[in-house]
Amino acid sequence: MNKPSKSDLLYRLLAERISSLGDGERFPTLREIMKEYQVGQFTAAPALRRLQGDGLLVSHVGRGTFVVRGRKPRKDAKILFLRPDWPSSSLTAMEEAFREAILAAGYRCEIRRYPVNTDIYRALPEYEADAVILSPLQADQFTAEQLQILTGSTRPVVLCRPTLPVLNIKCVGADFVATGLSAFSYLYGRGHRKIGILLSEHRAYTAATLIDTMCHCARSLGGEISVLDVNVQYGMDSRVMTRKYLETNFPDGKFRDFTALFVYTYEAAFEVKDFLDEKGVSVPKDISLMSYGFCSIPGRGQDITSITAPLPKQGRAIMEIIDRQFAGEFDCPGQITILPEIIECHSVATLPRDRQWRMQYETISN
């Protein structure tokens, strides 16, 4: 990845400065910028032209340069969705949902996939678009430079991830505490006291939050959680890794330590279902199956109960942020949480009451 030029760095500093100014306020001239930031004309002039091209500054001959904060919605604008390039039906489902939301809002849409080894935050200034929707590869922490790029962007950049304690970063995502609580309550309410969680994605704080919430619920209500880590790393195919894990650790398909299995991704849950079918293990008669997320797998129906923050709702929330940013409403809420919903199928059994009490007694005794 090319190192940002001096003009790019100056552009980010000036854009951040503009974000703290009001509509119509005077902005320093080219000579004033050169003197204040101790840069030459070939660094300062391109940065100012770019800010003017973005519609954030306007120059009047004989009067000076002024901040513009009242942009109108631009229905000819291009919205770019950036996602990692590893194989994932969940990301493909996100593509489809967000494309539909962008087109429904009247904008042009472009989908781009970036390599998993790319620092996508540093690469953002290189992409041509009026607004960016980003599915970040690593969203657990940010460097100071990455934060500066995100908070100093003069165009809307919305991250597909839960809310952050950084006010100027726009993001839309699921509430993983509510997701863990709802998933456990659903299984517990059907008599499941011993539950396995199959972690079929890379370890991230989102997965950790969901799992920790379910474990806390189990400790509080007298249940028991077993975490099975498939050890998926960034860029790996979760279905392939899930199959390997199952063949190695459960060759006969029998999960003897629990009655329900919660799979962290929907596409991996399909792999589990296929594996169990091949081993002659019946869902939900022999074991109940539930997953996080939902996506359409070609040639497959919807037969696994799941909990998810619906992608169409996420798409509409993202477009609401972008619409209002384009309209100059910079004080509008920029971090939106989508609450989980359960999509019921026939993969979770309700255990007979006598078995529920027996399992409860065994769990407490152990």
Image (tube, rainbow, N blue to C red):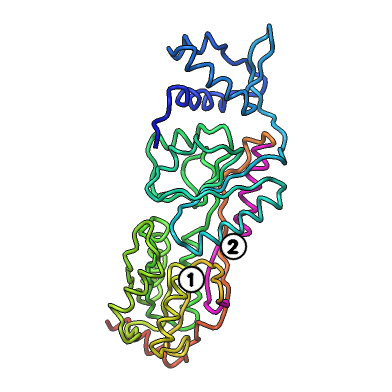
Q: Is residue 351 above or below residue 4?
A: below
Instruction: Please tell me the numbered disc located at residue 60.
Output: none
Query: Front-most of 222 and 313?
Result: 313
Task: Judge whether 55 appears above or below 123 on screen.
Answer: above
Q: Which residue is mark 1?
A: 183
Q: Give the quadrant of residue 144.
A: top left
Residue 91 sits inside the magenta stretch: no
Residue 69 % position (x, y)? 66, 28
Q: In the rendered image, which residue does mark 2 sit on? A: 310
Q: In which quadrant is the N terminus drawn?
A: top left
What amino acid is labelled 2 in the image? Pro
Stretch of the chain drawn in magenta: 300-326
Indicate whether 247 appears above or below 108.
below
Q: Position of residue 183 (x, y in %)?
A: 48, 71
Name the image quarter holding the C terminus. Answer: bottom left
- Disc 1 is placed on an element classified as helix
Q: Residue at x 39, y 71 (%)?
A: 220
Whether residue 315 appears in magenta in the rendering, the answer is: yes
